[in-house]
Amino acid sequence: MRYFLIFTLLFFLSNASIASSQKEVPNYLIFEKEGKQGLKDKTGQVLIPAKYDELGWSKGDLELVQDVVGFKKQGLWGLVSIDNQIVAKASYDQLYPAGQQLLVGAKPSPGTNRVGLLNTRGQVVIPFNYTEVSVTGMRVIVVKKNIKDYTYGLLDFKGNVIIPIEYKQIATLGGLRFTVKNFNDKTAIYSDDGRQIVDFELDSVSQFNGDYAIIYEGFKRGLVNKNGEVLIEPEYQEVFINKETVEVRPFNLWHVLSAQNELLDQINVQEIALFSTQLFLASANERMWLIRPNGEAVTGTYQQIITPDDEPLTTFRAEDSYGVINIKGDIKIPARYDSVYIDNDMIFVQKKNLWSLYDSFNIRKTTHFYQQIAPKSGHLFPVKKNHHWGFIDRMGKEIIHCVYDEVGDFSYNKVDVKFHGERGIIDKYGDWIVLPHKADSVSILNNAFYMTYLNGLKKLKDFEGDLIYFTENPVEIKDNYLLEYTSEGGIWKVDFSGQIVEEATGDSYEEVRKPSEGFYAIKKDGSYGFIDAQNRLRIANRYENVGDFHQGLAAFQILGKWGFIDKRERIVIQPVFQRVSQFYDEVAVAYDHTGSGLINKKGEKISSFSYDSLFIQPNGHFQAYKNNKIGLLDSLGRLMINAKYDYLRDLDNGFAIVRKDQKYGVVDYHGVNTIPIIYDKLIHDSQKKTFLGMKKSSREKVLLR
């Protein structure tokens, strides 16, 4: 019985091994024997003996093409038929099906493969003169490598040139149509007999959806049919191809308006943003360009233009490279760099991981290329060259040579550096003030003193080299003294002469807040009061909570109610409110059981207390919220705009932008609508004192001829 079990197990394992090495193709089975592959039919009859390194193709799925299959021998591929006849000798680096019962073959060649097409009889259909070939329908797209670039063309199966091999790209559209892109990145449409049916004026074309394809020209969209007829000129924001209909979306309509709703101009574009005092930034379909208030284009369309934030220069991106334009839209640095950084009128550009400095006239100022340029520190820019750091000035001159392992930020015209693994301090000319020494880090405190840190030891030194103070305790650096936290929980105040001028226990207060008007709110024994900068108790800790001093008053809480005291702890406003804010220009927000409102320094209510909340704005007005709607009060608590809007932006010029039912308009400080609430978006141009109101477009059906 034992021998029978062993024999059964061995038989099962042997058959499992054989099955795992076999690969199926329709009606055939590839098998392995002694590391070689062959082919059987479904009955198990051997058609191709197992004598090849591999059967199949150099890439793609295993399949037979007109009863032939690829074989690999000694690293090269050939063709063999299912009756074991060699169709093509093993002489190809690559061999795989291309469609239309053709095969792509690549012959060995120095530098690059020579690629062509052959049929299943091993005959050459397209000569092996190309870098790449691909079959599409009854045509072949071929690619040639030239000195500078690759060029595309179109051939038939006899090798005849249908479209010359001189273009940047060729792709099939379907419907016997091809898109052809030239080296100006403009696209045309050709038929499969080589006729140009749309000129080189498009940016790209979509695949055909039924009888139609969308054409893209800059930020505009249109429609073309399979005959190459432009049915819809590219002038729309979007084009939609449905099964039975075509729809278009026009560009949004923007009105340029005065505050009194006078129509000054109108522009058709997807989006608009403010750019400069003279120009708007327009955008549509992932393209941006600059326009005048009448919609006239000032620049070409780019992938991105950065709003300049009141600076004279800004960056733009075109074809994934960066350049610089000024606020008038003039190109100062062409878009040919991988990255650009601007500092006023200085322009740092990066190409192939190397940085250099240009001025706004496109003149290179640096004589070296740098691995890195960091943001300005003091009046100099840190730069990295040959893996070491130095500094250049705004003219590109290397003021401090690149010899340092690391550099810090300039402080008091000095900078800490790391040199050969040690720390020191140099001045703005690169002269040593503190020679390199062993330290984990160095901090410049002021013009006279610095700190060094090494293995937890802190040393306070002057620039004469004298040791002033040292400690291993944690320290906090203040303007003219140190706070040292002792291991016993105490705090020492140490001046820069090294003297301990004051000792605070540090554990007497449960909380110490930031100062306000010279007073520090403290919590002791569960109650709040105030101390001054000399740690003297100025207001006894007798309150449940306190606020900061502002305009001479601080809020205090007692028995759950809030009022105000002055710095002499006199109660100025009795604690009768549930919550209060600090005072702003003689008024504060207070809350009682009816709601929130404004009070003066006498505690008198100067507005209605019917609001849910009030928030002060920078101009002293208060946004008033009631039932999830917004209104506006002036600084004296007088009602300016009723709380009936979903959104309100006070422009501080007598007007406010408001939103109601998802539409925007303008009201004045009397609550009167000056621009109707009909716009989907509304932008205020404070420089021109105008408004940009957008009416969003809708989809429209188009009747095609």
Image (cartoon, grey):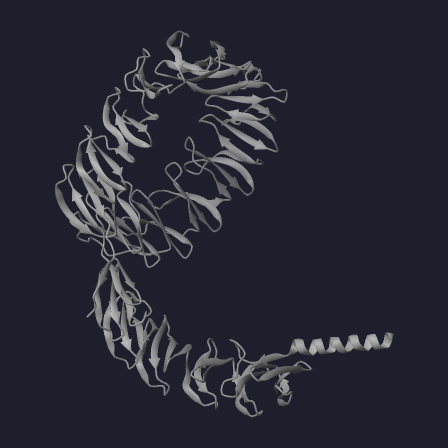
Q: Is residue 283 above or below residue 98?
A: above
Q: Is residue 85 above or below residue 191?
A: below
Q: Is residue 634 above or below residue 567?
A: below
Specify whether residue 368 is in view: no
> 564 or 114: nearer the eye?
564
Q: Position of residue 668 (x, y in %)?
A: 19, 31
Q: Residue at x 28, y 16 (%)?
A: 606
Q: Position of residue 70 (x, y in %)?
A: 54, 84
Q: Quadrant of the C terminus?
A: bottom left
Q: Residue at x 43, y 49 (%)?
A: 372
Q: Quadrant of the N terminus?
A: bottom right
Classify residue 125 by image quadrant: bottom left
> 240 or 199: nearer the eye?
240
> 468 or 476: nearer the eye?
476
Q: Position of residue 328 (x, y in %)?
A: 21, 48
Q: Position of residue 286 (x, y in %)?
A: 31, 55
- What is the count of numbered marks? 0
Specify whether residue 413 is in view: yes
* Lateral position of residue 379 relative to residue 198, left or right: right
* Lateral position of residue 93 relative to residue 327, left or right: right
Q: Is residue 440 above or below residue 467?
A: below
Classify residue 46 by image quadrant: bottom right
Classify residue 51 by image quadrant: bottom right
Q: Residue at x 29, y 36 (%)?
A: 647
